[in-house]
Amino acid sequence: MSFILNLPWTIVGILASVVSFPKNITFHKKPFAFVLHIRSFWWYSWLPSMRGVRAMAIGQVVLLGPYILPKDFEHELVHVEQAIQTPFIHPILYFIESRKKGYRRNKYEVEAYRRAENVYVENKKIFIYGAPGVGKTTHSLALQKEFGYPLVEGDYLREVEAQKEKTKEEDPFVYVGTKEAWQLFGECNEENVIKGLKAVRKSMNPYVLREIEKHPGNLILEAAFLDPEVLSKKGELILVVTPDEEKHRSQYYAHRTKDKYSEETFIAARIIQSYLIEEAKHYLVKVILK
C-alpha cells in the first residue's frame, strides 16, 4: 500500500533522473527503491542553498550524483524508509520541518545522519590531481560548475605564489612542472621522474597548505603536484587518470608542440601516472577514468 501511495513522488523521482542524465539503474530490496547513478544535479544545484548536493531520495527513488561520499547511499535509504512509514505525505512533512528548523536540524535529517553514521560536510575541500594531460582542468571546471566552489589551479600557486617568494637558485623545483623535474636529476627514467615528482611536491606543499588556510569554506584545488599523504585528512582526493596511452597522447598534444623534448615529457607523464595509481591504493582516493 505504501508503494502505491508513494507512486506519484516515485514517478517524479524517475522523471528527475531522466533529466539528470542517468548512467545506470539498480534495485534495492529492503527498503525497496530504484537506485540511479546520475551525471549531474544541474536542475537542482542552481539554487545557492543547494549547491553541492551529492544525493537525494524522491519517493522510493534514490539519485546518486557523481561525487557521493561514503554513507551517502545509506543516508538516502533512511529517507526512503521514512517515506514508506508516512507514505505520500512525507515530502510535505519534510518541507514543513525544514522550514521550521533548517536542513541540518530537522528531525528527518537528524535520524538519517544518525542511522547511516554519516558526517555532515558543510565546508568541503576537493583535491584533484593526476599526471599532465589527463583532463584535470576539465574535470575541475565541471566540478566548479556543479558545486559553485572557488577553484584554485596549480599554475597559480607555482607562478604567482611560489615564484614570487623564491628565485630559481633558491628552489629550482618551483620553476618546473612534475613532468620536467627529472631533468634536474639526469636522464628521463623512472627513478629520476619519481624523484622529480617528489621534489616538486616537497617544494610546493607549503603553498598548497597556505592556500587551504585562505579558504575556510569550500574549495576545489587542482594540481599535478598535490600530495595525498599531506592532504588525505583535509578533504576529498580525486585522482584523474587516462589508462589508454593513445588517448592520453592525443590529449597531451592538444595544446603542445610535438617534438623530441615533448615526447620525453610525455613519457615522464606516463611514468608519473603509473606511480600515482599505485600510490593511491594506500589512501582514500577516488579514481576518475578519462
Image: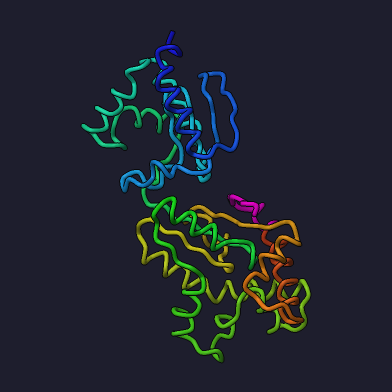
Percent position (x, y) of residue 188? 76, 78
Q: Residue furthest top?
A: 1
Residue 38 position (above or below residue 46): above
Residue 211 x/y as whole percent: 42, 68
Compared with residue 231, is residue 257 higher up or lower down, i.e. above or below? below
Q: Quadrant of residue 185?
A: bottom right
The residue at the point 43 percent across, 45 percent down is 42
For the N terminus, the image quarter is top left
Q: Nearer the viewer, residue 246 or 110?
A: 246
Looking at the image, residue 115 sits to the left or right of residue 258; the answer is: left
Q: In the picture, which quadrant includes the C terminus?
A: bottom right
Q: Is residue 102 left or right of residue 209?
A: left
Q: Is residue 160 magenta?
A: no
What's the residue at 56%, 54% (across, down)?
238
Figure check: 245 above or below 44 = below
Pick out the residue farthest to the left.
100
Residues rendered magenta in the picture: 277-290
Residue shown at 36% from the left, 17% from the top:
88
State how many labels appear: 0
Residue occupying the far bottom of the picture: 169
Q: Which of the two residues, 85 or 92, is positioned nearer the viewer here? A: 92
Name which quarter of the figure residue 200 lies in: bottom right
- Residue 171: give x, y in percent of width and height: 55, 85
- Image quadrant assignment for residue 37: top right
- State the colouring used for the structure image: rainbow
Q: Which residue is pictured at 61% across the width and 57% down the height?
A: 240
Q: In the image, residue 187 lies at what x, y percent?
A: 77, 82
* Magenta region includes residue 281: yes
